[in-house]
Amino acid sequence: MKKQKLFPVALLVGSLVLSLLAGCASNAAPSSNSNTPPAASTGASASTNTGSSAPAQPASEEKMKLVHEGKLTFAMSGLLKPLNYKDENNVLTGFDVEIGKEIAKRVGLEANPVTNPWETILQGLKGNKYDAIIGSMTHTEERAKQVDFTEPYYISGGQIFIAESNDTIKSKDDLKGQIIGVVQASTHKEVAETLTDKEKVKGYPTDIYALQDLVPGRVAAVITDRVVGTSAIKNQGLKIKPIDEVLNKENIAIAVTKDNPVLTKKINEAIKSMIDDGTYEQISMKWFGANLLK
């Protein structure tokens, strides 16, 4: 009789326990219409549960390496007006500086332009004196062995300039027998000698002196760096014009150390966004009256 009385009681207690457990489980699990999202899975569990999930990247690959935290420190010679130079207040300015400042802003950093002698500027970068070189450096195979380069932020190279009023010379093929001005001992002299008679190549101490001789007709053409001639039109008001494409295309790019791929990637993204939204062209037109990527 005693055993028969205990059996229903045991069943009742068991039912109560199961009900309580079910209620707890229900409260612990998020409902399908709950506003609170489930806790995020760890990288390990995500990769275990779904084969398509990418493994977490090491922190060293996700972060830029910076000489000064929160700043993009970039170097130049400071001696290439209007590309980079110091104004009357001894403040760095110019096309390179403005490009660097815009890149820093888009990367989310404070711009910190600095100068370094050109002959040791690569060594300074590799020695972590600054994060990048934004100083009109040509991307060459030899330099690319030492540092990484971004996409070009302008294109330069030897360019033929003639007087604005000259309608007879249309291309480099029209220069045979013509007097061509070049800077003495420059590589442009060798190019000029292939386009006209050797004795028709006239040397000058500076590019500006050569370009100034175009309008009065003392030379028929001048071969100089594209940026130098374009700047003379914009800033010196010389009545000259370029013809043909650049003779030896040079991609001017930003140098970054090889162990800083995240920074290189972010700078490339910044350059692209500047081009896409028209900011790049505005800066280029301001300093040169032309888009230096075209």
Image (cartoon, rainbow, N blue to C red):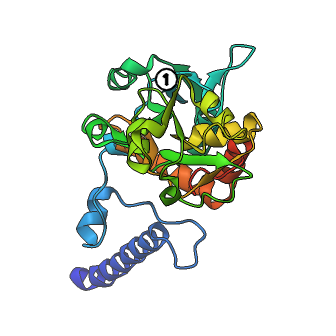
Label 1 sits on a secondary structure element that is loop
Question: Which residue is at the front of the view, 180 or 78?
Answer: 180
In-image side of 159 versus 19 (left or right): right
**Location of the N terminus (image quadrant):** bottom left
Task: Tell me, yes or no, if residue 156 can be seen here.
Answer: no
Q: Position of residue 284 (x, y in %)?
A: 66, 46
In-image side of 147 versus 232 (left or right): left
Q: Position of residue 245 (x, y in %)?
A: 51, 57
Q: Position of residue 39 (x, y in %)?
A: 45, 60
Question: Which residue is at the front of the view, 25 or 235?
Answer: 235
Residue at image position (23%, 66%) is: 48
Say which quarter of the image contains residue 40: bottom left
Residue at image position (66%, 34%) is: 213
| Residue bearing mark 1 | 68
**Mark 1 surroundings: few (<14), some (14-19) or many (≥20) residues within 10 A:** few
Give the number of callouts.
1
Residue at image position (46%, 31%) is: 133
Q: Is 212 drawn above or below residue 7 in the view shown? A: above
Question: Which residue is at the front of the view, 204 or 224?
Answer: 204
**Location of the C terminus (image quadrant):** bottom right
Task: Tell me, yes or no, if residue 118 can be seen here.
Answer: yes
Q: Amino acid at mark 1?
A: His
Q: Position of residue 8 (x, y in %)?
A: 32, 84
Residue at image position (40%, 39%) is: 198
